[in-house]
Image (spheres, grey):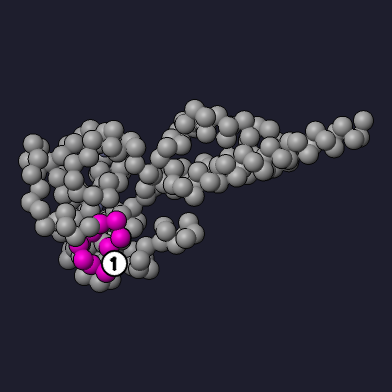
Amino acid sequence: MSETESQAAPFPAPPVLKAGAELAGQLCSICQTTVIAGESVVACPCCALPFHSECWDENRGCSAYGCKAAPPTIKPKQDAQPLSNAWGDEKPCPKCNKKIKAQALKCRFCGAVFGSRDVISKEEYASREYEGNEYAAARNKVMLLFFLSVAGCIAPLGVILVGILISHKELMGIDYRRLSPTLKALLWCAFGVGLSLILMMILLAAFDS
Ligand SMILES: [Zn+2]
Ligand SMILES: [Zn+2]
Ligand SMILES: [Zn+2]
């Protein structure tokens, strides 16, 4: 399975609209806050539920269980159980710790995406694979490291950075443990290719002299 396949929403993105009077006041069921007139919104192509377009993108689809446009990570079982936790109808965001709606799939303060309505601990959140915008940001940094490592004369710099990230697990705001298997493989590939390049440059220099 390629990266683009695993990241693609099951449905093409619905057109982004500016919320008018008919949508204002309706609840976005991803972040559980009301839509304000003028905000960018989308309507689910299957069940017509309104969402902030940003929430739709981060959730990679509809948040209604069983909806054909919902991302595959949402399990119908969870919605059937009444949400009971010590926080009542609120829960702490595992990233910024601010109080958010218990049903929220995304924090409206820091933008953290959970992929499940359950309360998850900070540790659990920190150990989960990157998702949504965080995934995109981590992927871009991994790509940058990859290109640094295979880019001729600056390859040693890239290889050193990749080596630090793999051995120390954290660098440039990337947590190696949270990367998807594909991104981890890409880093190892960068490391291998970069090392071979450096070796070749050393050998070439040795032959020249
Ligand atoms: Zn929203
Ligand atoms: Zn839907
Ligand atoms: Zn948060």
**Disc 1, ligand 2: is the CB inside 8 Å?**
yes
Q: Is residue 201 left or right of residue 52?
A: right
Q: Residue at x 48, y 56 (%)?
A: 3
Q: Residue at x 53, y 42 (%)?
A: 142
Quadrant position of the C terminus in the picture: top right
Asked if the magenta segment contains residue 73, the reply would be yes
Residues rendered magenta in the picture: 63-74
Task: Name the amino acid type tagged 1.
Answer: Ala
- Which residue is more in the foreground, 110 or 165? 165
Q: Is residue 209 left or right of residue 91?
A: right
Q: Residue at x 46, y 37 (%)?
A: 176
Secondary element at image label 1: loop
Residue 202 in view in this figure? yes
List x then y, in percent, for residue 52: 27, 56
Which SS does the magenta portion mostly show? loop
Q: Which residue in the structure is indicated by mark 1?
A: 69
